[in-house]
């Protein structure tokens, strides 16, 4: 619902991403804040922020795939790995510029996603989930076996240099943020296009969509390609940020975390995906703080507290959201905004 | 030598088949893919280890106790986590079972850490059948698997509970109209699946060691079996398990490196040729 006194009188207004002056103010203010905040925070939080950015891109890929098109993927981390290894190989071994490998990482990840999706897209639901789980295991297994990629020990990735100097954390965050903004814009924008509407139609009822003349196979493949493309971009950022990648970094668990992020945020909403990433990463930070306290209190558990707690807290949070707020944080946010827009007649909905 | 490998694969296939059976039981009645099942099996193995060594319960008492634990675990998960979500979307239920699995795994890691254990009654040495040598643990697993399948087949064919479960599997609404308590059947199928988890927990605890990756290993073997056999077919689980059990060591024999990935490759192949599995019903869809 729009704020009081704002009316959509033209189609362009109806589909505008940024509609009111307040939204413009929040957008510009928020962007300025995000660009400058990194200058004032300690190093640990800077790297936390960069990881939030990386996960956001991967989660947005999942959002296009799952939230918009309804195709579940439990192999997003593996497609991130494909992107990361692409840049590690092309950039590290063949000396290509990282700026050239950026789209290439996305492309290889997208193509590998399509390869695994093809057998499963003829049917729905469970089988696609299975196929993506298989993708996760097969890709990671291959990376562990392939000696030319460093096997289990992984491989080094060159740093990104601008003007001969490697990027520091602050500059890397600016790069990440730029990519995040582009990705968010893309994800927001796709919902307004014909393609995006086709995605939503397929999600809501694929048989009906097919009757309306939607090419199901092509649409699902396209959704998969876009989702995995984003994963590849996230992998590229990941690789160049850590300078070192190994197959273990892209575990099955990471894929599930990404899925949990978009569930917590709210399926099918771009803002929700971002919110979900931030909440889960904050939880992670909280567990890091909490683990030493618990392990001090219970000396017998010292070594295993951190991994166990992160599992338990994550599971508890996602279970809470599925039970109590299945439509996610974004829905709650919308309700809150609506409440204040209608105030003092909020009960009118 | 080759016969040994084939026999071993066949017997291990029995364990896989049992692992897949737990998924099938739940899926058939309530159309839920229980991804927590791997961790349910793992915690059963751990609890048995804990009962036998830390508490000192004798083996003959420990195993029935474990069966009770498994059944209660299945019941509790269904009642607390799954029933409130009845009628929710497929993804919500899938994520719920996954997260229950995470919780169980978290508890396992918290209590038992990263060490791995051997169940005290694990038989050692090799068993000789005619002239072929096999590991006794896998052999006994295979025997147990055949017995369980026999019992389940009889149960489904000749008892009222089995009949009720078959009706619910065919159509929820019709079952309800016929006076069958669908919720109770759901609950029952989870209890049976938990009981099976206890059985499989003992077997995999013997075949592999009791370690923190047990749940993931079982999940990694059980899911391909499930797809190969078909999501809702009990004979499919048996045949799928035996196929995967056989294909895995044969693949490993040809190229040792691909052994771990063979089940998944077989699964992708089946998805390409017969997308509903060898024995699955054509339309498996949430209503």
Image (cartoon, coloured by chain):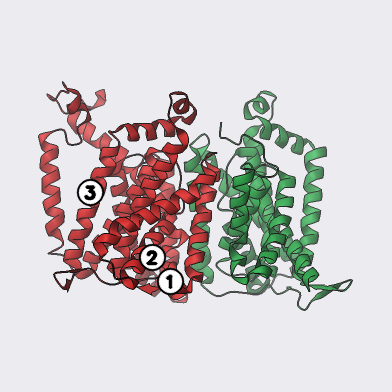
Chain colours: A red, B green
Identify the mark nearer the N-term, 3 or 2.
Answer: 2
Give left or right: position of B112 versus A10: right
**Res A168 visible:** yes
Q: Nearer the viewer, residue A307 or A230?
A: A230
Q: Position of residue B49 (x, y in %)?
A: 65, 69
> What residue is disc 3 on?
A182
Instruction: Give a yes or no on whether discs 1 and 2 share a subunit.
Output: yes
> What residue is disc 2 on?
A85
Instruction: Give a yes or no on whether discs 3 and 2 share a subunit.
Output: yes
Q: Which mark is residue A88?
A: none
Q: Nearer the viewer, residue A267 or B284?
A: B284
> How far, Cα to Cα, is label 3 from label 2?
23 Å
Q: Position of residue B256 (x, y in %)?
A: 63, 71
Identify the mark nearer the N-term, 1 or 3.
Answer: 1
Identify the mark nearer the N-term, 1 or 2.
Answer: 2
Quarter containing the C terminus of chain B: top right
How many numbered tags mark residues here? Answer: 3
The chain identifier of the residue carrying mark 2 reads A
Give left or right: position of B211 versus A204: right
- Do tag 1 and tag 2 residues touch (Cβ < 8 Å)? yes
- Do tag 1 and tag 3 residues touch (Cβ < 8 Å)? no
């Amino acid at each position: 619902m729009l704020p009081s006194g704002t009316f959509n009188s033209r189609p362009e207004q109806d589909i505008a991403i940024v509609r009111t002056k307040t939204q413009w103010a929040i957008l510009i203010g928020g962007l300025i804040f995000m660009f400058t905040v990194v200058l004032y925070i300690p190093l640990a939080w800077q790297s936390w922020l960069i990881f939030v950015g990386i996960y956001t891109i991967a989660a947005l890929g999942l959002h296009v795939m799952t939230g918009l098109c309804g195709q579940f993927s439990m192999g997003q981390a593996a497609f991130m790995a494909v992107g990361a290894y692409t840049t590690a190989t092309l950039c590290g071994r063949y000396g290509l510029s990282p700026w050239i490998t950026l789209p290439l990482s996305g492309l290889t990840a997208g193509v590998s996603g399509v390869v695994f999706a093809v057998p499963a897209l003829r049917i729905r639901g469970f089988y696609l989930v299975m196929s993506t789980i298989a993708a996760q295991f097969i890709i990671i297994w291959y990376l562990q076996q392939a000696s030319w990629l460093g096997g289990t020990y992984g491989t080094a990735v060159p740093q990104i240099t601008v003007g001969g100097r490697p990027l520091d954390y602050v500059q890397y965050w600016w790069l990440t943020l730029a990519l995040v903004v582009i990705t968010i814009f893309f994800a927001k924008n796709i919902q307004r296009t014909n393609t995006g509407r086709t995605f939503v139609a397929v999600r809501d009822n694929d048989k009906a969509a097919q009757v309306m003349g939607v090419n199901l196979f092509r649409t699902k493949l396209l959704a998969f390609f876009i989702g995995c493309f984003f994963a590849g971009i996230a992998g590229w950022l990941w690789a160049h940020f850590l300078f070192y990648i190994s197959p273990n970094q892209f575990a099955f668990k990471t894929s599930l975390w990404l899925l949990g992020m978009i569930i917590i945020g709210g399926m099918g909403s771009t803002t929700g995906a971002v919110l979900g990433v931030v909440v889960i990463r904050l939880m992670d930070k909280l567990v890091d703080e909490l683990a030493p306290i618990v392990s001090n209190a219970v000396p017998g558990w010292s070594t295993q507290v951190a991994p166990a707690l992160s599992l338990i807290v994550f599971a508890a949070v996602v279970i809470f959201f599925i039970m109590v707020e299945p439509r996610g944080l974004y829905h709650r946010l919308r309700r809150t905004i609506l409440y204040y827009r209608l105030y003092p007649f909020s009960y009118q909905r | 030598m080759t016969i040994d490998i084939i026999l071993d694969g066949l017997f291990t296939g029995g364990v896989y088949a049992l692992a897949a059976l737990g998924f099938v039981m739940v899926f058939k009645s309530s159309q839920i893919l229980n991804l927590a099942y791997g961790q349910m099996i793992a915690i059963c193995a751990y609890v048995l280890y804990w009962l036998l060594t830390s508490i000192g319960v004798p083996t003959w008492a420990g195993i029935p106790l474990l069966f009770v634990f498994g059944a209660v675990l299945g019941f509790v998960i269904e009642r607390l986590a799954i029933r409130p979500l009845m009628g929710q979307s497929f993804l919500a239920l899938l994520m719920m079972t996954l997260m229950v699995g995470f919780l169980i795994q978290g508890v396992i890691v918290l209590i038992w850490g990263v060490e791995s254990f051997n169940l005290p009654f694990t038989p050692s040495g090799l068993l000789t059948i005619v002239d072929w040598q096999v590991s006794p643990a896998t052999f006994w697993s295979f025997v147990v698997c055949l017995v369980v399948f026999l019992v389940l087949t009889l149960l489904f064919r000749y008892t009222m509970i089995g009949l009720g479960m078959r009706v619910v599997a065919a159509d929820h609404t019709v079952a309800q109209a016929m006076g069958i308590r669908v919720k109770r059947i759901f609950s029952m199928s989870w209890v049976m699946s938990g009981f099976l988890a206890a059985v499989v927990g003992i077997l995999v605890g013997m075949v592999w060691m009791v370690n923190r990756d047990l749940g993931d290993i079982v999940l990694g073997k059980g899911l391909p079996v499930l797809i190969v056999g078909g999501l809702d077919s009990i004979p499919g689980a048996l045949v799928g398990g035996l196929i995967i059990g056989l294909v895995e060591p044969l693949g490993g024999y040809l190229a040792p490196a691909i052994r771990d990935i063979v089940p998944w490759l077989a699964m992708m192949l089946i998805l390409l040729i017969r997308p509903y599995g060898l024995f699955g019903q054509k339309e498996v869809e949430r209503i």
